[in-house]
Image (tube, rainbow, N blue to C red):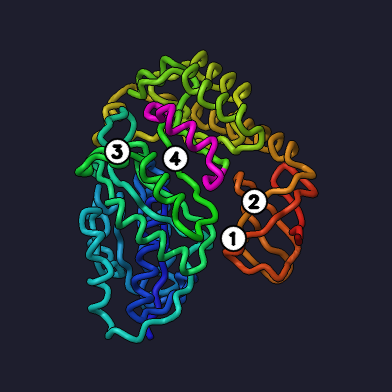
Amino acid sequence: MRSFSIQTFGCRVNQAEAFLWADELQNQGWRFERDCLRSDLVLMNTCTLTRNADRDARKFIRAVTRENPKARLVVTGCYAQRSPEEFKDLPQVWKVFPNEEKHRIVSHVSTIASQGESVSPLPFRSRALVKIQDGCDFRCTFCIIPWVRGQSRSIAQAEVLSRIRKYIDQGFKEIVLTGIHLCSYGHDLNPPSSLLDLLEEIENLEGLTWLRLSSLDPRYLSLPLLEHIAKSEKICPHLHLSLQSGSDRILARMGRKIRCCDFNRILAHLRDHDPFAALGTDIIVGFPGESEEDFESTCDFLAYSPLTYFHVFAYSPRPLTEAASWSQVDPKVKKKRAARLRNLAGVKNFAFRKQCLGREFKGIVIKKGKDHAQVLTNNYIKVHVPASLADERNEVKVKITSVFPKLTEGKIIRD
């Protein structure tokens, strides 16, 4: 039986695609191998959002070539879409699939080995990721995604519900909905639908325990959708809302068409509803034209906001984007600003986790080792607990007993 592994880079959409491939390949008799250096076939789903993402993909290929020279590499994703020629001349790369040909990967891979018997699938992740939408119709001045993923396209509601039912039947307790622009879901369907319509249908599925949403665009988060998410008993109290800057002037240069005060009103609404909800965002530092005043505005906004975490990225010029041609901020300044914000992110998250000390939360066992297991709570805290009888994917109740700057400890509560 031939073995395969999958290496994903970048967003949760890539992870959801990999999740589906892993399921389909195992149904064809392939054996899933978690270690890329021990598999016959390695599927790479790449990202090209930043220069570092490109670098990480090339570094991974070099490692596989050096440590597992007999493996065949299949490369796909946004980097492969943007610059396929960078991969085609590498001897270990068997095939390059641009994004529009991803649907052919499993059928193409099956040609290099005779189909075996279906095996009991080994889960690619402890939580099931489901892609409901792809592409983006907007043109933020820094973002290459519309060029490498195309226009917004929604997956039919019936197909989404069918996939989720399948994963529930396989024993998954948490479903994660992913998309490039989730708030655009359904606008292109006939008849038109919406993310709110889809959520209501999913929440009615028998056996669903938890539903988690990946990143949402606050510019298109309607009040009815916001209210539904806040009050839902099935949707995890964890929202990631893309912002990118805490300066209104920089947001305008980015083409974001939102003000910080509007974003803060959304956060305040969510925090008032649930004081222990996880609220996160993404921040770009060193965007072209970002002054010290703009940066200080971002620092102040983040420091006084109810955000519990944020991911920080130093701006990276991307081909085809408008901002790539603008005057750039000095790399040393970018690095310094990014370090300062990452430190602030650590302080904010530590404070949030300390507020949860002594409290009990529901969660999913996402990793289990000999001495300890890791539980992801519904409000997005990774809690290390002593090894227990709970297996991966199981829902448990966990009490947070200790909080450190980079570690949260707890214990599983038995009812």
Whole-number angstrom distance, CA of label 4 to CA of label 1: 20 Å
10 Å neighbourhood of mark 2: few (<14), some, or many (≥20)? Answer: many
Label 4 sits on what residue type? Ser
Q: Which image quarter holds the N terminus?
A: bottom left
10 Å neighbourhood of mark 3: few (<14), some, or many (≥20)? Answer: many
Label 2 sits on what residue type? Lys
Looking at marks 1 and 2 on the same chain, the residue that comes earlier in the sequence is marked by: 1
Nearer mark to the viewer, of 3 and 2? 2
Label 1 sits on what residue type? Ile
Residue 10 shows in this picture: no
Name the residue beneath numbered marker 1.
366
Residue 219 counted in the magenta span: yes
Q: What stretch is highlighted in magenta?
A: 218-236
Whole-number angstrom distance, CA of label 3 to CA of label 1: 32 Å
Name the residue beneath numbered marker 2.
382
Nearer mark to the viewer, of 3 and 1? 1
Report whether 234 appears left or right of 352: left
